[in-house]
Image (spheres, grey):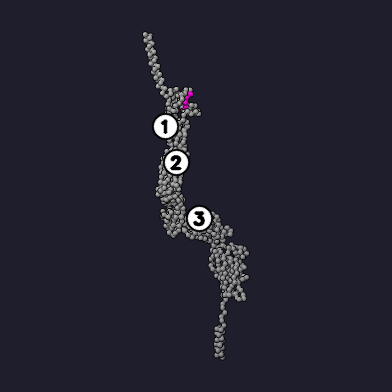
Amino acid sequence: MRYKRIFLALTLAAVFSLLAIAIPASPALAAESIEVDPDEADIGDSVDVDGEDFDESTDTTDEYVDIYLSSENGDIDDIDDLDNYEMWSKRVDTDGEFSKSFRVPTVLDEGDDDEEVVGGTYYIYVTYEDEDDVEDYAELTITSGWLDELSPDSGPVGTEVEITGAYFSGNDDIAITFGDDEVDIESGDTDTDSDGDFTCTILVPASTAGDQTIAVEDEAEHTAEATFTVEPEVVVSPTSGSAASEVTVIGTGFGGEQNVTVTFDGTRVATVKTSSVGGFTVTFDVPETGAGTYDIAAEDEDDNAATADFSVAAGVSLGTVTTEDSPGYVGMEMTMSGTGFLPSTRVTITYATEPVVVATTTSDASGEFSATFTIPPSESGTHTITASDGTNSLSSTFVMESAPPSIPSPLLPQMGVKAEQPVYFDWEDVEDSSGLTYTFQIASDADFTSIELEKSGLTSSQYTITEAEKLASTKKEAPYYWRVKAIDGASNESDWSGAGTFYVGFTFPGGSIHLWWGLGAAGAGALGYFLGKRKSYYY
């Protein structure tokens, strides 16, 4: 009996073993799952959601899932608990898998209320189509707001850049960094509006050449970045001058701590090392050269380069500067110098409105010249002194003095005397830096309406009338009147002197005086004879 039981047990064991081998094992059911790639993204970036172990689609049945993006906490089981979200649908393939790509939207607008998307943690949920149960979820970090644009996005140090941002936290202060340093907001918004938007401007700070990052961050630590390309620049001061004049070059946006070669029209004039932020300053003298526009260029060891124009203009100057308060005068010695003229070329120097050539010279090999001359007679006021080489023609101003000379004082003949012919006139000397002449008049009336004699351009302070100019005899009661004035080389005139008076007695015609002397002598002889005879008569 016992053996029968043992045999039965062995038989059942064998049967169950055969059944275990013959009947395949049923697979264990796996839970649905999703993966998000990438798990950090900006607004507008593409995000992939991959799912597996979902109900498979067949030849006769399609399975779909609904994918939700929301800012609401991921610890929910029922999708109806979401108030704000964005939703997409996707078919599951025959292997129970799906893959869906979407771009991070700016607004979640398929829930109860619209919600702006900002930086922070968001959640992706998956349900079967039209079902409420959440099968799986994953986190997506939206790392920042969004910089709409930089305007411009390249330029030298000091460029004003307009930054437009959106989708930051609403009503938050913002801070801006350029490279590693925070920069001031020059104008515009310093915080976001209620929608998380802002527009502001900054100035590009001192920085090295190439791409630099502009980053914006709000108080909630939402950030966005954009790239600005710093370009090298040189600024020269002054921008024009003559040969041998001093010029300063300021460079920005070059490589940091690099040697920079500075050239003028291709000729090296200086070498300087930049600062850690790519800036430098160097001063040099403009090489000897003719007039024209030349390049001042700077280039560092990494081939960062920039140029600026410098104009060498022909220039002239006078050795003595004259003004209305400190004028020049006729006969003044003057030197005119010039630079930037044609080299080894004849230069003609002319004076005054109606040009008078006062000097000629030849420029040297570098276009420089110098000539000395005297100021010719000309009217008072402003005149130009011009130097010309036939191509370049430049002028400088000369101011001629306008002070009139002193009034001469009459000396001879004395007032009211009878003057002997030929009448001699004398007056006091007058001094004037521009030199002078005198004009002398004799009239028969006190108003000088009847001019008997006028002499101008007299260089001496005296005059004797000639035989041909002898005056007719007059009575004391009807004298002649005379006066004099001074006129300097700048045509400045003194007033007339006071009028002197004199008269002229009767004079014999030429040769008759000898006749009268002879008649007088004969008369005296006859008188003596008569008296002698009378005396003899009376004795």
Determine crowd level at label 2: few under 14, some 14-19, many 20+ residues with C-alpha closer than 10 A.
few
Determine crowd level at label 1: few under 14, some 14-19, many 20+ residues with C-alpha closer than 10 A.
some
Identify the residue under disc 3.
159
Nearer to us: label 3 or label 2: 2
- Secondary structure, mark 1, is loop
- Secondary structure, mark 2, is strand
Type of amino acid under label 2: Val
Residue range (magenta): 478-483
Residues at marks 3 and 2, CA–CA distance in whole angstroms: 54 Å
Query: Most prominent secondary structure in the magenta stretch?
Result: strand
Q: Nearer the viewer, residue 465 or 254?
A: 465
Which quarter of the figure has residue 273?
bottom left
- In this view, the residue farthest toward the top is 539
Determine crowd level at label 3: few under 14, some 14-19, many 20+ residues with C-alpha closer than 10 A.
some
Residue under the image location 53 percent in, 66 percent down: 40
The numbered mark at residue 356 is 2
Residue under the image location 49 percent in, 60 percent down: 211
Q: Nearer the viewer, residue 7 or 463?
A: 463
Q: Nearer the viewer, residue 433 or 234?
A: 433
> Does residue 321 sit above or below 523 in this rendering?
below
C-beta proximity under 8 Å, tags 2 and 1 = no
Identify the residue under disc 1.
460
Q: Residue 359 location, x and y as percent?
A: 42, 42
Type of amino acid under label 1: Ser
Q: Residue 235 location, x and y as percent?
A: 46, 53
Q: Nearer the viewer, residue 139 or 299?
A: 299
Type of amino acid under label 3: Thr
Which quarter of the figure has residue 414?
top left
